[in-house]
Image (cartoon, rainbow, N blue to C red):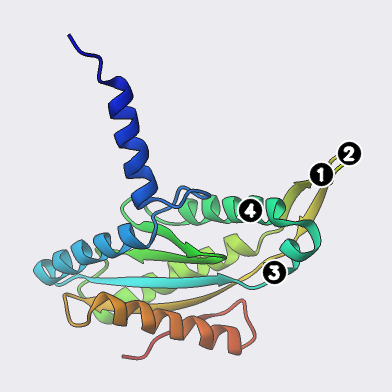
Amino acid sequence: MLDITERKNMEEHVRQLAFYDTLTNLANRRLLNDRLIQAMSASHRSGAYGAVLVLDLDNFKPINDTQGHLVGDALLVEAAARLKSSVRSMDTVGRFGGDEFVVMLTELSTDEVDSKMQVGVVAEKIRITLAKPYVLTVQHAGQSSVQIEHHCTASIGAAMFRGKSVCQDTLFERADAAMYLAKEAGRDQIRFCDI
């Protein structure tokens, strides 16, 4: 008899590193692309819309600059948890890197207007959830830990899809462009990409 527990644990660890962000445990770019391909195929069969939301935290850099990267990482972990709690279990939340996150919504309505309303409701829920104050523990060398409150909002860009009408890269680019429009509009905003 051969104990393969260690090998199985190693395989799971490699899989985790290949498909998930090491800090937040959210899907990484590779897994997001794979899930988007699957979602577009399912959408093609069902006729239901889906959407990709790209969001960027608006006031993230100051916390890294003033409190250090460990505190910034703690904020990213908290933001990731808030994002996951804002969507259905069938939806995918991922991190592209830095303070940029992606949410993929699937199996929306077959009606474009209804789907856009659904996306708007979810995006607004995410925006409100991420705008709540973050209470973070800070400890600098030789000092006792203190809790600080940090306010951070999100700029959100959304691009909808139905079937395989556009490639994944184009869809991400459209959502990203819409997110920059939200930033230009004053941050803490939601913008849709006009196809």
Badge 4 or badge 1: first in the primary sequence: 4
Q: Is residue 18 left or right of residue 137?
A: left
Residue furthest toward the right? Answer: 143
The image quarter containing residue 3 is top left
* 81 relative to 172, above or below: above
Amino acid type assigned to the residue bearing label 3 in the image: Lys
Q: Is residue 136 left or right of residue 111?
A: right
Which residue has dot 4 on it?
73
Badge 2 or badge 1: first in the primary sequence: 1
Distance between mark 4 and mark 1 Cα atoms = 13 Å
- Inspect this view and state whether residue 191 appears: no
At a point 58% along the width and 56% down the height, the residue shown is 79
Horizontal and vertical percent position of residue 171: 31, 79
The image quarter containing residue 76 is bottom right
Which residue has dot 2 on it?
144
Q: Residues within 10 Å of mark 1 (few under 14, many from 20)?
A: some
Badge 3 or badge 4: first in the primary sequence: 3
Disc 4 is placed on an element classified as: helix
Labelled pair 4, 2 in contact (Cβ < 8 Å):
no
Badge 3 or badge 2: first in the primary sequence: 3
- Inspect this view and state whether residue 80 appears: yes
Amino acid type assigned to the residue bearing label 2 in the image: Ser
Q: Mark on residue 139? A: 1
Which residue has dot 3 on it?
61
Distance between mark 3 and mark 2 Cα atoms = 24 Å
Q: Residues within 10 Å of mark 4 (few under 14, many from 20)?
A: some
Horizontal and vertical percent position of residue 124: 51, 70
Q: Is residue 145 left or right of residue 191?
A: right
Distance between mark 3 and mark 4 Cα atoms = 11 Å
Labelled pair 2, 1 in contact (Cβ < 8 Å):
yes
Amino acid type assigned to the residue bearing label 4 in the image: Asp
